[in-house]
Image (cartoon, rainbow, N blue to C red):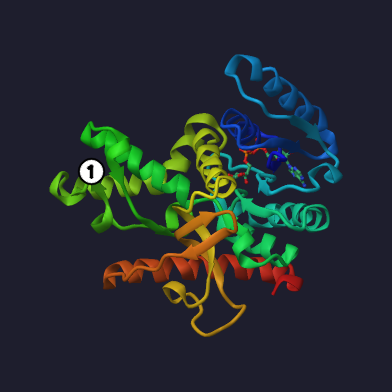
Amino acid sequence: MRRPKISVIGAGNIGGECARSIAMKELGDVVLLDIPDKEGVAKGKALDLACCGPIERFDAHLVGTSNYADIAGSDVVVVTAGLPRKPGMSRDDLVDVNAKIVKSVSENIKKYAPNAIVIVVSNPLDAMVYVAWKTTGFPTNRIIGQAGALDVARFRAFLAMELGCSIEDITALLLGGHGDDMVPIPRLTSVHGIPIGELLPAEKIAAAVERAKVGGGEIVKLMGTSAWYAPSAGTVQMVEAIIRDKKRIIPSAAYCENEFGVAPNQPGKGLFVGVPAILGAKGVEKVVEIKLLPDEKKLMDESISHVRDLVAVVKTKHPEMA
Ligand code: APR
């Protein structure tokens, strides 16, 4: 039986950490690809990681490259190519430059790995998933954005810090766009089945929500660039669900039309927004729709409208994606 093949485009902070984690979990062989100027970094990281194998006891073949032919036959391609945020920047500030990068990466994925499932990580996430979809033309189940896996992890981590309990026991539901646009649903957040509202006053929950929203920015301010450990962990959680066909429900930027009222009865006019999705061997196997209360629906509608505005910016600059 052949081992799964996972390609990671962009050998920077997130790409390198994704490659490490994929190898450590033995999810498959890894191709780490960057632009020709950074080929040395891609090759160096792959080699360095390969030398961890005997210590960490994993079997994975790791290749660094700038040649897209090397991604041929990939089961999953993770796109981390693009500029990260610097202090004072919002994710949206990256839309122009990263749309060009994700477009060129997607053209190569289409050419060299036409059967792959694509997980986009580049920001602004909700618009970059759209770019990958329009450029590859892949069916929507094979195009997914990583945002919710990270946002919900941040929310759970901040709640655990507040409660002084293990994060393992906290489950939370989160919808909407990445970061500032996320729509946490405290009503469906619990600690070992105990609704969070019974354990924390409303203002503490609101503070955890707020901190999760701006959690990325908090780290950018501290480090001068955007985070990579938790974004990579969220991404690899999705890779694992797909490669091992786990059918996990992971909040993901998945294509919606009728779902959550994104574009009802408008075939092909949907958007990728953060929703609970069942991830398995086919990629997004189902978007799990839940009934929202009026105030939750209002927040979700606002979030969807922001994603639509961001996608409109892409369409204006790249009419071929309209
Ligand atoms: N093809 C392949 N790789 C590219 C391309 C391209 N066309 N353009 C840029 N890259 C590479 C860069 O050379 C760099 O090595 O993408 C890598 C990005 O790495 P970092 O600068 O370390 O950024 P990182 O923190 O990994 O974030 C990557 O993910 O979460 C988002 O906002 C983040 O958009 C950013 C992306």
Residue at screen point 69% across, 17% down: 51
Above or below residue 65? Residue 107 is below
Judging by the rendered image, the residue that carries numbered circle 1 is 192
Task: Assign a secondary structure to mark 1.
Answer: loop
In percent of width and height, residue 290 lies at 35, 68
In percent of width and height, residue 167 lies at 31, 36
Instruction: Quadrant for the C terminus, please.
Output: bottom right
In percent of width and height, residue 215 lies at 42, 42
Amino acid at pointer 1: His
Left or right: 138 with respect to 261?
A: right
In percent of width and height, residue 131 lies at 68, 62
Residue at screen point 69% across, 38% down: 3
Left or right: 200 with respect to 14?
A: left
Visible residue check, residue 202: no
| Label 1 crowd (10 A; few <14 / some 14-19 / many >=20) | few
Q: How many labels were placed on the picture?
A: 1
Above or below residue 306? Residue 153 is above
Given residues 104 and 220, the one toward you in this image is: 104
Instruction: Quadrant for the N terminus, please.
Output: top right
| Ligand 1 picture quarter | top right
Residue at screen point 52% across, 75% down: 257
